[in-house]
Image (tube, grey):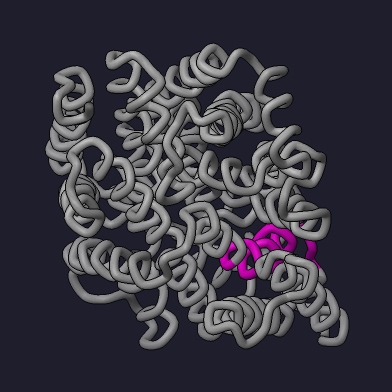
Amino acid sequence: MALESPYILGCVVGYLLVCFLIGAWAMGRTHSISDFLVAGQTLGPVVVVVAAISSVMSGFGFVGGPGLVFEAGMSSLWMTFVAPLGAGVSWILLAKRLRLLSEAREVLTLADAVAARYGEGVPRLLMGLAVLLGVLGYLGTQIMALGFVLRAVLNVELPLAMAIGVGVLAFYSVAGGIIAGVYTDLFQGVIMAFAAVAVCWRSLEATGGMAAISETLWQTDPALIGPWGDRGPLTALSWYLLFALGAVGQPQAITKFLMLKDVRDLRWGALLFGAGYVVLSLLWMSVGLAMRALVERGAQAPLASPDEAAPAFLLSHTPEWLAGIVFAGLLAAIMSTADSFVNIGAAAVVRDIPTALFGRPAVAELFWTRVATGLLLAASAVFALYMENLVALLGTFGWGTFAAAIVPSVALGLNWKRATRAGCVASIIVSLLLNFALELAARFELYQVPGGVATGCVALLASLAAFIFVSLLTPPPLLHDDVAAVMDL
């Protein structure tokens, strides 16, 4: 259907063309590393809020979310329904402090903020490494989701579909940096909101409504629509904690605070962000449940992978004009986050890690940041193909890596003057070692956290404990006057 449909191909090609045009336009406005990483701090509140929502929802939510609901049912509610709460809290805890800190110091990245709070050297290095490792996991999520969507539309093999998507993404990311990213986010956010509402309505219409879906699933797998879903209570509750608290530590969202032109524009950010995320979550839940019900009834052929739930629903159960728009929305969701992550990761490679090791960023910082952007996209694509996990589970791994490293040192550290440099170092080391050790142990079937508890949740709790206890056991820090003043506000 996809190759024979001018509506679907037209919408997808038109969307990719818009990305090229925005990238070319943004390239003319990108003259410095500040422009590339934080848009020169010239953005208004609407652009920042929409960009933050788009980057958090992403392919994780628009492709991985329906796939996880298809496989595990209501377990996924414990991710998507609490994430807006955590993201809103991040606006309250961090937005003003990060933005004002960027006026007191040259803060373009989270590692810059960590260095301002705890001092140069090891804290900056560890935060740069944590961000880089998390980016590889989460960016791999977006590229894998991008491949699933383009494979459905173009009817090509997954590696080729991923290569096509990465090529388009590389152009506007390398050319225009975050300026291209946030303005494509603005365009993408509108598409995504329409897509979420329209597909939710269509999924209910195609299945006879929520009551009919519930009846079908109750007869075939009652646990699927129970309060915990197929994954059980420990997994669901660990996801709840990871996504409620961990949302405060997602760099693709909180670095948007640094881009605001005026700190007073933060006033309505938390409310608008939470409401927008709830709207976009409609697609996450409705498509997954509808496709599972259709498969159980025999009205839909079994899926080769749960991650095909959203593309398959669009191709088989929606009008072509709607499928075309929503496929563009799926691409929008994926590319918005991928662009944010690739900028963050490139900054870690060219700015954060070299500054920690050698006292300054790389020479010709803007040029090498663009080079690093392309290399990170290629490395993340290889990582995603190797992991071979569900898109949503790859996203959970990336989310957990960021949460465990960033929530203690940045979210708590900028609100607690007693936090020390040693506490920051200890928490990041614990978060990285534990998160990756548990993930690799599960990957090679050496050890699995009991009860299905999410690896990221274990790492987050351990990281928080290390941060608090080590800070209390070490001498109180002597804060610089400008940093102390920011924390007092």
Residue 463 visible at all: yes
Drawn side of residue 314 relative to residue 50, left or right? left
Drawn side of residue 15 relative to residue 141, left or right? left
- Residue 59 is a magenta residue: no
The residue located at (53%, 29%) in the rendering is 294
* In this view, 275 is above or below 427: above
Q: Nearer the viewer, residue 148 or 304?
A: 304
Instruction: Locate the N terminus by quadrant.
Output: top left
State the image coordinates of residue 42 (x, y, percent, origin top left). Answer: 38, 36
The residue located at (60%, 78%) in the rendering is 442
Residue 268 visible at all: no
Count of numbered circles in the view: 0
State the image coordinates of residue 154 (x, y, percent, origin top left). Answer: 18, 39
Q: Nearer the viewer, residue 457 or 234?
A: 234
Q: Residue furthest front?
A: 298
- Residue 416 is a magenta residue: yes
* In this view, 3 is above or below 410: above
Drawn side of residue 29 relative to residue 81, left or right? left
**Magenta stretch mostly in which secondary structure?**
helix
Task: Indicate the quadrant where residue 144 lies.
Answer: bottom left
State the image coordinates of residue 401 (x, y, percent, origin top left). Answer: 58, 67
The residue located at (35%, 80%) in the rendering is 354
| Boundaries of the magenta span | 401-417
* In this view, 371 is above or below 50: below
Q: Nearer the viewer, residue 453 or 190?
A: 453
State the image coordinates of residue 434 (x, y, percent, origin top left). Answer: 65, 81
The residue located at (73%, 66%) in the rendering is 452
